[in-house]
Image (cartoon, grey):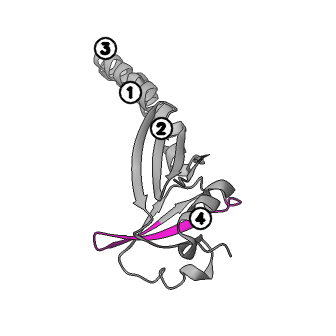
Amino acid sequence: MNESYAEAGVKRKKSATTLMIQIAAVFGILVVFFVGGMFLGSIATFIASVLVVLCVFFFPRMNSIEYEYVFCDGQLDFDKIMGNAKRKTALRIDFDKVEIMAPAKSHSLDSYNHIQQLKVKDFSSQNPEAKVYAIIVRKDNEVNKVLFEPNEKMIACIKQKAPRKVVEV
């Protein structure tokens, strides 16, 4: 039996939106505590305390998002790891339903980029220097473009399992 197994992982770069949400939350807590404290007294202190607890709970999940890719015998799983604690399977792809896998900037994907219903799922680190691959998969009358950053071993395993679907240009 010839089983293929490879795994890879990337840590997502912190986005500007996440940073702005965190700054706004801290600023909001300070406003509620100081300005609300003058007018509402202990109610504002209680509300600010609840907001601090919520920030302590949600900030670690916003700071650290990682993606892990696991290829096992024709199936590719994408797991999202939030705050180094919570793992969730975000997507599972069976390579029987894949049309093509190629570098994201490859001309092999040009014919798929003009599809109206193309949904893009990004599991990459969003690092401009990273080598991002795209997978075009048809599932339940939907066309999905999945972006990810496989390592060399994973590309070799996928190419061994589905050689005509992998483009390495």
**What is the chief secondary structure element of the magenta stretch?**
strand
Q: Which residue is mark 1?
A: 54
Q: Quadrant of the C terminus?
A: bottom right
Q: Which residue in the protein does label 4 denote?
A: 160
Mark 4 or mark 2: which is in front? 4
Q: Label 3 sits on what residue type?
A: Ser
122 or 49, nearer to the observer: 122
Disc 3 and disc 4 in contact, CB within 8 angstroms? no
How many other residues sit within 10 Å of disc 4, few (<14), some (14-19) or many (≥20)? some
Q: Which residue is mark 3?
A: 42
**Residue at coordinates 40% horizontally, 45% vertically from top-left?**
89
Residues shaded magenta: 128-145
Q: Give coordinates of residue 159: x percent, y percent.
A: 59, 66
What mark, if any, has residue 82 been given in the picture?
Answer: 2
In the depicted view, which residue is nearer to us: 93 or 161?
161
**Residue 44: percent from the left, percent from the top?**
33, 21
Mark nearer the N terminus (4 vs 1): 1
